[in-house]
Image (cartoon, coloured by chain):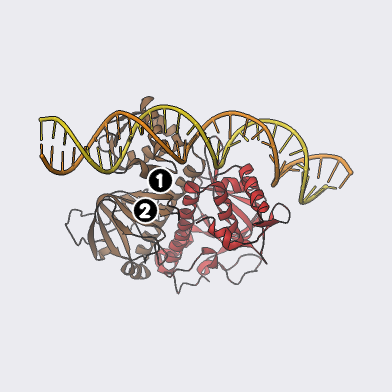
Chain colours: A brown, B red, C orange, D yellow
Amino acid sequence: MLDMANSFQDRGAQRFVPLNPSAGEPSAPRGLGGLAAKEVSYDRDEEIYGEGEPSEYLYCVRRGAVRTFKLLRDGRRQIDAFHLPGEYFGLSASETHRLSAEAVIDAKVVIVKRRALETRAMQEADIACAMWRLAADDLRNAQDHMLLLGRKNALERVVAFLLDMDRRLSVAGVMALPMCRRDIGDYLGLTLETVSRSLSALAEKGALSFNGSRQIILNNRARLQAMTE
Amino acid sequence: MLDMANSFQDRGAQRFVPLNPSAGEPSAPRGLGGLAAKEVSYDRDEEIYGEGEPSEYLYCVRRGAVRTFKLLRDGRRQIDAFHLPGEYFGLSASETHRLSAEAVIDAKVVIVKRRALETRAMQEADIACAMWRLAADDLRNAQDHMLLLGRKNALERVVAFLLDMDRRLSVAGVMALPMCRRDIGDYLGLTLETVSRSLSALAEKGALSFNGSRQIILNNRARLQAMTE
DNA sequence: CGGTGAATTGACGCTGCTCAATAGCGGTGG
DNA sequence: CCACCGCTATTGAGCAGCGTCAATTCACCG
């Protein structure tokens, strides 16, 4: 069960709040505060929900990766966030989704009925506080990302992305990106070509090493960090 | 007192959630859920709080306008949001502010101690839900703004800004902008010159009329709306 | 009126986009 | 096992939209 002891303390990224700490159960995990949960699988590029649809669940990524995004009528896409194992998404305060969600690669997610969550939240302040924290964590990420989209140049954006992904999914110093260059571009407000060129430039400078186009090793995190501030 | 009856219904923008519906009281308004509140005044461009400082209050704009923003080391600025009368800001889930806040013009704000709010929230789910809604509304705005910053061109950005401001502060079809072109640019991820040029182009096309550089009348809202979708 | 900060407008240049060609990589089947 | 195919990524050339720098002009206030 979700640890509520410090609901108001600064606790860092949401992914460290386990939906189901006794992980590994195949299906019907106990879920948030004992609420019924269900596991669902999605294929690569499969839609999880669409913008405008009723918002019925809170989702937690178990395996794979998910992108949430918005589209303009002519097809321009802005990816809001990538959601990796352990992270929550899809809980909206409005009745309908304000974003669409798709699996970046084959993914498993755990879902909890929003209605049940809200009912519990009206009774138990702990649950309501946890929901507040989820929204607040998303908001913080969004604020950082607005600075990136509004004021950083291409290289700074790519470096920020790499450092974020490195922190969230590196194993033994190697990150295996689940998403393609177009996804990265649509997240960073760039084209896939500009992303590719920026990565090549960083590799050229020795700031990173490739192990195939999606496996990347950062060679000097502190120096990269200084490039985005 | 904040209406809690429909805490989980889709209720639109946060500014319609009155902190103190019996407005007009000069000082010490009753505030959120009966919590002690205090009124504070700030001069134009005065700092309300800085990024990194402890987050101690929830703020509600009573008069004037407030900008919240982030800075890069070299001075590039991204304005996160403008906060107009009736709107809340400054409540962070973390212990420290992730944004800075300044008065755009002379402003009065009502403040409520965060500690008191959180104490109440742990007891009353209503309060916690209201806090969730505040964060969720901010998040929704941030998501829309990321699409704007990442994928819209200069003209589309300026049109989106005008429609938003028109909705939030127009009186009898006329909006009196409290902020300068630089503020608008830093909000839209543009330079002040590009903002000025876009406004001139719109006036040239007859889409809007000026009454001095900061008083603007939109002439065809539906057509403008179609330009940003 | 005159002064000061804000806004407009112009000329020019650069960053990142567009369009296009090529190279790499992973999966599939002969 | 390797040849092939399709998708992804890289790289190049040219261009355009927005930024930069600079010169006026405008609006507000003493």
Residue behind mark 1: A186
Q: In the image, residue A207 lies at what x, y percent?
A: 37, 28
Marks 1/2: CA–CA distance: 11 Å
Q: Are marks 1 and 2 in contact (CB under 8 Å)?
A: no
Identified at 58% across, 54% down, the residue is B159
Determine whether, in the image, residue B125 is placed left or right of residue A1.
right
Mark yes or no: residue A152 visible.
yes
Determine whether, in the image, residue B177 is placed left or right of residue A47.
right
Q: In the image, residue B107 lies at what x, y percent?
A: 65, 56
| Quadrant hosting residue A111 | bottom left
Q: In the image, residue B172 lies at what x, y percent?
A: 68, 67
Mark yes or no: residue B85 visible.
no
Identified at 18% across, 53% down, the residue is A24
Q: Chain of mark 1?
A: A
Mark 2: amino acid: Thr
Q: Chain of mark 2?
A: A
Mark 1: amino acid: Asp
Q: In the image, residue B1 lies at what x, y percent?
A: 53, 71
User: Which of the pair A98/A20 is nearer the observer?
Assistant: A98
From the image, state whether disc 1 or disc 2 is nearer to you. Answer: 1
Q: Considering only order in the chain, which callout, 2 or 1, is on the residue closer to the N terminus?
A: 2
Identified at 42% across, 60% down, the residue is A98
User: Are the residues under badges 1 and 2 in a single subunit?
Assistant: yes
Vertically, is B213 above or below D3? below
Question: Which label is found at residue A68?
Answer: 2
User: Which of the pair A194/B107 is nearer the observer?
Assistant: A194
User: Which of the pair A75/B112 is nearer the observer?
Assistant: A75
- Circle 1 residues within 10 Å: few <14, some 14–19, many ≥20: many
